[in-house]
Image (cartoon, rainbow, N blue to C red):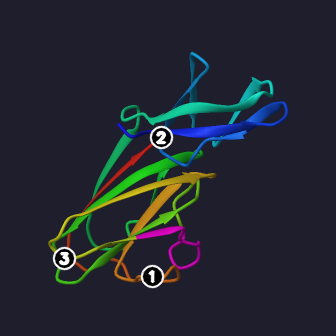
Amino acid sequence: MAQGFIIVPTSEHVDTWVLPSLAHREAAIIGGTADAGLADTYNTDIVAAGSYGVAVREVASGYTTFHRICTSGDNALNVKATPGRLKSVHGFYTGATPVYIHIYDKASAPTVGTDATVWIVPVQADIPANVPVYRNMTAGISISVLLDMTSSGTNGLPAGGTACIGLQYW
């Protein structure tokens, strides 16, 4: 479990401070623990008098796992229809060429070639891809699997190729 500290400067009264962009986080504050969840900002009531060290650690459990076997076509689908945080993307492709997992910040299935891709994960033929992402998604999490590396690409998987896709998210 990753763990670290941040310093909260308190030259004056502090009501809000920002946690580092990790995964799901817990913050131990002056003997207590607060679940920061998906928020990047944590509200507190620390009065001035120097700097406070705040322990922050990644919580390794509590995420949801998504799996999909993708065959021919763009395989555009919605994974999570509400805001969330993408933890990691995993992929394996049995075809002869690389494929690209396109990630969209969208609450419905993406319109491939039109909707903007926010993250692209390359998957080489017959080589597993395991990519930590740790990215906040404000609308939702959607994916497509394409032969194109560009956001405007529309070439889906050919017949006979199979991609196994996995995502972990909160």
Q: Residue at x 34, y 81 (%)?
A: 147
The type of residue carrying mark 3 is Ala
Q: Say what secondary structure mark 3 lies in.
A: loop
Which residue carries the number 2 mark? Answer: 170
Magenta stretch, residue numbers: 111-120
Q: Position of residue 22 (x, y in %)?
A: 49, 46
Which one is earlier in the sequence, the residue at label 1 or at label 2?
A: 1
Q: Which residue is mark 3?
A: 125
Query: Viewer-proximal residue, 129 or 148?
Result: 129
Q: Are marks 2 and 3 in contact (CB under 8 Å)?
A: no
Query: Where residue 154 appears, x then y in whole percent?
Result: 45, 82
The answer to whether residue 167 is magenta is: no
Is residue 79 shown above or below 155? above
Q: Residues within 10 Å of mark 3 (few under 14, many from 20)?
A: some
Q: Is residue 163 visible?
A: no
Check residue 120 in the rendering and tell me which mark sits there, or answer none: none
Q: Residue at x 44, y 62 (%)?
A: 143
Return the x and y of residue 76 as percentages of the image width and height.
43, 65
Residue under numbered circle 1: 154
- Which image quadrant for residue 70? bottom left
In the rendered image, residue 12, in percent from the top left (x then y), is placed at 85, 34
- Relative to 99, 12 lies left or right: right
- Left or right relative to 62: residue 36: right
Marks 1 and 3, how far apart in space?
19 Å
